[in-house]
């Protein structure tokens, strides 16, 4: 800790951030890592691994092809109404395959036909309560009820084919995106597990994290800058069926890509990602302090993360924290990442428009993300399934790798049961003329 304080004082005197990391050259390595230049001078380290190319599938006979065309077909029908008083009404008009997803899932059953949630202050601009609230209606002195007029209405009516994603299938790619302060090393257990099963995996280091370049400009770490980095990585490695797996802040980038590329994103996994709310940096956060002060406090921040990010704080967790490179970033990058989390478009309407199946994984000991936020996310999304892990916390993929790997693999293999074919209407018997 004394070293951190001393470096912080030098940082204040010299006016430069301590422990600055310079950009790396774009190189190819022989240990499975690739350094991709997403923009001039902006290089990301990427872990890309996969099986050897599989043989071409045998041609299907006409009956097999017809059966394959019907499997996994889901009709997504939803109407989203945004009212001027700040309320959101979500109406599920079609059949959503929820109850048959995973064995042992938490909270099964069909989704509600309609879900009404509050987006903003329920009071109107004049301070009076909205229609439908207490004190309004036909019983209040004969006053006429005001009709709520929608600000905008969004109709979703599409068909999606949701199929089982098996290992060694040439058109399946798994993308793993970490959050603030981490690196691709936090996915080690998942990457090794799925590569052994024959999957192709891609895991990048965000800018300023791991071995990626760290520009010394705060604008390089805004949500939009990082999202464009992930877009470049996705377009480079994406195939026909892509599965996005995000943790914490990385969930926001998965949501962004799923919204931008609905035909390419097949499934999404959100691990301790929080609720479907727009991102906005906190003004009173500790990360709004000057960089040199943050550097002085870095040992305390690492210990606080260990206490809040893991259900237990033993020698094993400390080693996991060291191996996973959590918070092993410069103070400048950490401050810029936290202050750059501005994404007003990513609100509940944005999430309600997603038609991709989503698996939500939540560690019950998470002190960063309350379980209520993931429950709210499950309510807003059209095809969402929430799984709670009692033994896990925020870094659940490090604490309970076997459980997380099993959940992810079951979700990859899941496909909805085919909808029952409509029976032909009975035709009246012909009447013979006499």
Image (cartoon, rainbow, N blue to C red):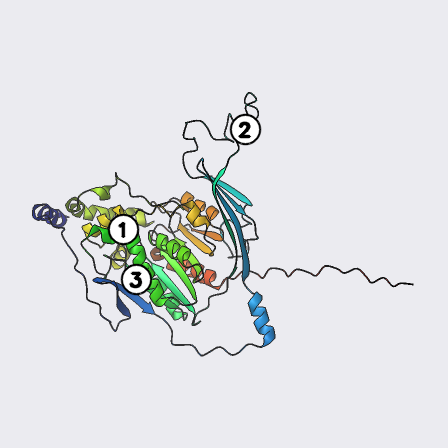
Q: Which residue is mark 2?
A: 145
Locate the C terminus and report the quarter of the image it occupies: bottom right
> Which of the two discs, 2 and 3, labels the residue nearer the N terminus?
2
- Measuring from the top left, give residue 340's x and y in whole percent: 27, 48
- Determine whether label 3 and label 1 are within 8 Å by CB: no
Q: Secondary structure at mark 3?
A: strand
Query: Relative to 172, does residue 77 appear above or below in the rendering?
Result: above
Which residue is painted at 52% across and 47% down in the image?
79
Q: Nearer the viewer, mark 3 or mark 1?
A: 1
Query: Relative to 299, does residue 202 appear above or below in the rendering?
Result: below
Specify few, some or many for label 3: CA neighbours under 10 Å numbering under 14, 14-19, or 20 or more.
Answer: many
Q: Secondary structure at mark 2?
A: loop
Q: Secondary structure at mark 1?
A: loop
Residue 204's disc number:
3
Residue 11 showing in the rendered view: yes
Q: Which residue is mark 1?
A: 222
Q: Nearer the viewer, mark 2 or mark 3?
A: 2
- Determine whether label 2 and label 3 are within 8 Å by CB: no
Residue 192 showing in the rendered view: no
- Measuring from the top left, give residue 155's x and y in whole percent: 51, 49
- Measuring from the top left, give residue 176's x and y in whole percent: 35, 60
Which residue is painted at 48% across and 46% down in the image?
379
Most extreme residue toward the top, as rendered? 141
Mark 3–mark 1 Cα distance, whole angstroms, equals: 17 Å
> Which of the two discs, 2 and 1, labels the residue nearer the N terminus?
2
């Amino acid at each position: 800790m004394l070293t951190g304080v001393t470096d912080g004082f030098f940082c204040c005197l010299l006016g430069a951030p301590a422990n600055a990391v310079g950009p790396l050259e774009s190189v190819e390595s022989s240990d499975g890592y690739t350094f991709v230049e997403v923009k001039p001078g902006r290089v990301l380290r990427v872990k890309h691994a996969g099986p050897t190319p599989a043989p071409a599938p045998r041609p299907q006979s006409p009956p097999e092809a017809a059966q394959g065309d019907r499997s996994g077909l889901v009709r997504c029908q939803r109407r989203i109404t945004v009212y001027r008083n700040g309320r959101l009404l979500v109406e599920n008009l079609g059949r959503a395959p929820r109850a048959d997803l995973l064995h042992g899932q938490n909270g099964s059953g069909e989704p509600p036909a309609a879900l009404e949630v509050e987006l903003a202050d329920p009071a109107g601009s004049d301070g009076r309560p909205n229609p439908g609230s207490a004190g309004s209606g036909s019983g209040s002195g004969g006053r006429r009820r005001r009709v709520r007029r929608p600000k905008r209405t969004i109709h979703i009516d599409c068909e999606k084919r949701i199929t089982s994603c098996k290992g060694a299938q040439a058109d399946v790619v798994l993308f793993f995106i970490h959050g603030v302060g981490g690196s691709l090393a936090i996915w080690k257990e998942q990457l090794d597990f799925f590569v052994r099963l024959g999957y192709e995996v891609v895991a990048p280091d965000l800018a300023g994290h791991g071995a990626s370049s760290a520009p010394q400009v705060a604008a390089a770490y805004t949500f939009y800058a990082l999202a464009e980095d992930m877009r470049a990585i996705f377009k480079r490695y994406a195939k026909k069926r892509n599965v996005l797996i995000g943790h914490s802040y990385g969930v926001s980038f998965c949501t962004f890509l799923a919204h931008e590329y609905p035909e390419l994103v097949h499934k999404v996994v959100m691990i301790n990602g929080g609720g479907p709310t727009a991102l906005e940096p906190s003004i009173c956060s500790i990360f709004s302090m000057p960089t040199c002060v943050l550097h002085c406090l870095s040992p305390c921040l690492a210990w606080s993360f260990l206490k809040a990010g893991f259900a237990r704080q033993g020698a094993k967790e400390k080693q996991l924290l060291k191996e996973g490179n959590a918070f092993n970033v410069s103070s400048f990058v950490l401050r810029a990442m936290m202050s750059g989390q501005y994404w007003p478009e990513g609100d509940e309407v944005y999430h309600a428009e997603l038609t991709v199946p989503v698996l939500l994984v939540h560690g019950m000991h998470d002190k960063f993300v309350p379980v209520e936020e993931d429950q709210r996310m499950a309510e807003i999304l059209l095809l969402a399934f929430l799984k709670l892990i009692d033994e896990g916390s925020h870094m659940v993929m490090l604490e309970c790798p076997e459980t997380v790997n099993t959940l992810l693999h079951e979700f990859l293999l899941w496909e909805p049961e085919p909808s029952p074919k409509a029976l032909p209407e009975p035709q009246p018997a012909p009447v013979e003329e006499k």
